[in-house]
Image: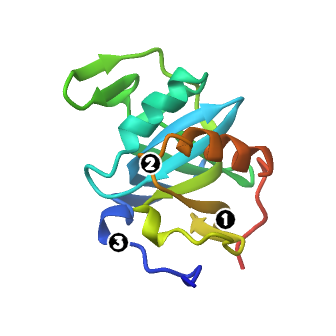
């Protein structure tokens, strides 16, 4: 059984972090973010792990693109809000086709972090796990991004996730 406290690869650590006195802490992470019914989902994984591909399939099911490749996180009002850095807002890389412009979603509260991994690293019955972003504990799950059921698993998990997470201890 895998431990829910797995080390986070360097590729997922914040790209930039700063404290802003008026809006709270901020950081930028390597990932892709979508909003599903106003709830933010942050897809995390190494380059080529399938973040943009999975986001494309979620968008096809009704999700909205928040950001691709880099995601700005802000601790605001007791929650983490995700948005796109200005230069890449609305842009989605579709491997083999190029960069596509979509209407970007408004900033979305982070409700679920999804680590993209091969299926052999996913427990059949995982314990509830969380990942901390800017001092807040966010629900976390692992998904094989190339399984046909991956978008559905994320939607089902999101249905059980609160938009306002508890403070991390």
Residue 84 as seen in the image, left or right of residue 136: left
Of badges 3 and 1, the one in the foreground is 3
Identify the element where label 2 is drawn. Answer: loop
Instruction: Give me the residue at 68% from left, 71% from top.
Output: 125
Residue contact at pointers 3 and 1, CB within 8 angstroms: no
Q: Which of marks 2 and 3 is in front?
A: 2
Residue depicted at x 61% and y 62%:
140
Residue drawn 76% across the image and 47% down it: 163
Mark 2 neighbour class, 10 Å CA radius: few under 14, some 14 to 19, many 20 or more: many
Q: How many labels does the image show?
A: 3
Q: Which type of secondary structure does the marked residue at label 1 adopt?
A: strand
Rate crowding at label 3 as few (under 14), some (14 to 19) or many (20 or more) other CA atoms within 10 Å.
few
Pick whichever of labels 1 and 2 is earlier in the sequence. Answer: 1
Coordinates of residue 4 in the picture (x, y in percent): 59, 79
Q: Which of 23 and 124 is in front in this view?
A: 124
- How many angstroms separate mark 3 from mark 1 (CA)? 19 Å
Q: Is residue 136 above or below residue 58?
A: below
Mark 3, secondary structure of its residue: loop
In the displayed structure image, the side of residue 33 where residue 79 appears, left or right: right
Q: Is residue 29 visible in the rendered structure shown here?
A: yes
Residue 9, disc: 3
Q: Mark 2 points at which residue?
A: 145
Q: Nearer the viewer, residue 133 or 60?
A: 60
Where is residue 105? Give x, y as percent. Answer: 55, 24
Q: Earlier in the sequence, mark 3 or mark 1?
A: 3
The part of the image, by quadrant, that contains residue 64 is top right
- Image position, residue 39 (x, y; %): 69, 38
Relative to 149, 158 lies left or right: right
Q: How far apart are marks 2 and 3 (CA)?
A: 17 Å
Residue under circle 1? 136
């Amino acid at each position: 059984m895998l431990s829910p406290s797995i080390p986070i690869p360097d590729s997922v650590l914040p790209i930039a972090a700063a404290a802003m006195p008026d809006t709270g802490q901020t950081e930028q992470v390597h990932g892709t973010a979508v909003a599903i019914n106003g709830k933010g989902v942050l897809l995390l994984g190494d380059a080529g792990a399938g973040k943009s591909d999975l986001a494309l399939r979620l968008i096809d099911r009704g999700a909205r693109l928040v950001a691709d490749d880099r995601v700005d996180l802000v601790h605001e009002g007791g929650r983490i809000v995700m948005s796109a850095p200005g230069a890449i807002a609305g842009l989605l890389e579709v491997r083999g086709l190029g960069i596509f412009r979509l209407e970007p979603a408004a900033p979305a509260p982070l409700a679920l972090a999804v680590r993209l991994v091969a299926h052999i690293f996913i427990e059949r019955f995982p314990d509830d796990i969380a990942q901390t972003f800017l001092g807040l504990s966010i629900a976390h799950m692992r998904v094989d991004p190339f399984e046909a059921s991956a978008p559905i698993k994320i939607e089902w998990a999101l249905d059980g996730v609160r938009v306002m997470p508890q403070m991390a201890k």
